[in-house]
């Protein structure tokens, strides 16, 4: 074997090693950028405004942004819904709202939030129900389900509620909670859009 052949083979081996190393670092960089799994998303069955049953496990394949709330909340819940409507409008521009990305709002207060009240809230806030499910059910059941998601809820003497401010969750297409956000004015819509796009790429 000539020195030239040895040199050529050595050069090819070096190139292959460099490419393999680069691929390894790119793969690990992409993996490190993935959102971690917080927990499996507990399944639940609640009623939509039209009376049909909404079962979380039947929504597999979609990315979901889900809030626990109540419509008579004076501050953080309407601020959260307002920000979600802004996100909804941006996702509609991108043509992925409803088809690939779904929103859900679950009320703690079904006695006050009747279908009529919830519907009026949706119209007032600009909620597009083609990709947004408004859900209600038995109060104790809903509070228990919120607890399974790590959300504490307490009814006060004046029939208002206090709850964990991190009651906004991002669920991936495999029914796993991947991010928990603070609600209200502290929401970072740009970050949430980025996280949604990241989960869509994983599907």
Image (cartoon, rainbow, N blue to C red):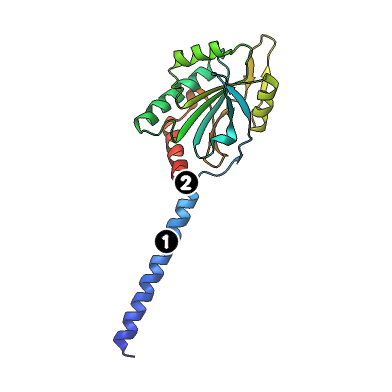
Asked if disc 2 and disc 1 are in contact, CB closer than 8 Å, the reply is no
Question: Could you say where residue 35 lies in the image, as x and y percent from the top left?
Answer: 51, 43
Say which element carries label 1: helix
When asked about the image quadrant of residue 68, the answer is top right
Is 188 placed above or below 20 here? Answer: above
Q: Is residue 103 above or below residue 111?
A: below
Q: Secondary structure at mark 2?
A: helix
Check disc 2 and report the residue beneath it: 202
- Looking at the figure, which quarter contains the N terminus? bottom left
Task: Find the residue positioned furthest to the bottom.
Answer: 1
Residue in the foreground of this view, choosing between 90 and 7 = 90
Across and down, in percent, residue 107 comes to 59, 20
Please report the residue visible at 63 percent of the width from the left and 22 percent of the height from the top: 163
Q: Residue 116 placed where, x, y %? A: 54, 11
Estimate how packed mark 1 is, as few (under 14), some (14 to 19) or many (20 or more) residues with alpha carbons within 10 Å. Answer: few
Residue 74 visible at all: no
* Label 1 sits on residue: 23
- 14 horizontally vs 170: left or right: left
Name the residue located 43 percent from the left edge and 39 percent from the top edge.
Answer: 197
Q: Does 79 appear above or below 17?
A: above
**Residue furthest top as drawn:** 158
């Amino acid at each position: 074997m000539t020195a030239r052949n040895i040199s050529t083979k050595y050069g090819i081996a070096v190139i292959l090693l460099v490419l393999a190393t680069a691929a390894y670092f790119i793969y690990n960089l992409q993996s490190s950028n993935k959102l971690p799994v917080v927990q499996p998303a507990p399944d639940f069955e609640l009623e939509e405004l039209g009376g049909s049953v909404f079962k979380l496990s039947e929504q597999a394949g979609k990315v979901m942004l889900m809030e626990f709330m109540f419509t008579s909340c004076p501050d953080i819940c309407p601020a959260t819904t307002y920000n979600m409507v802004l996100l909804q409008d941006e996702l509609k521009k991108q043509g992925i709202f409803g088809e690939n990305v779904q929103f859900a709002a679950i009320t703690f207060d079904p006695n006050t939030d009747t279908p009529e009240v919830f519907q009026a809230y949706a119209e007032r806030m600009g909620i597009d129900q083609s990709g947004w499910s408004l859900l209600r059910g038995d109060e104790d059941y809903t509070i228990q389900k919120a607890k399974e998601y790590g959300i504490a809820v307490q009814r006060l003497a004046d029939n208002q509620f206090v709850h964990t401010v991190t009651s906004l969750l991002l669920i991936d297409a495999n029914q796993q909670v991947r991010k928990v956000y603070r609600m209200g004015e502290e929401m970072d819509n740009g970050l949430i859009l980025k996280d949604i796009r990241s989960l869509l790429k994983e599907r």
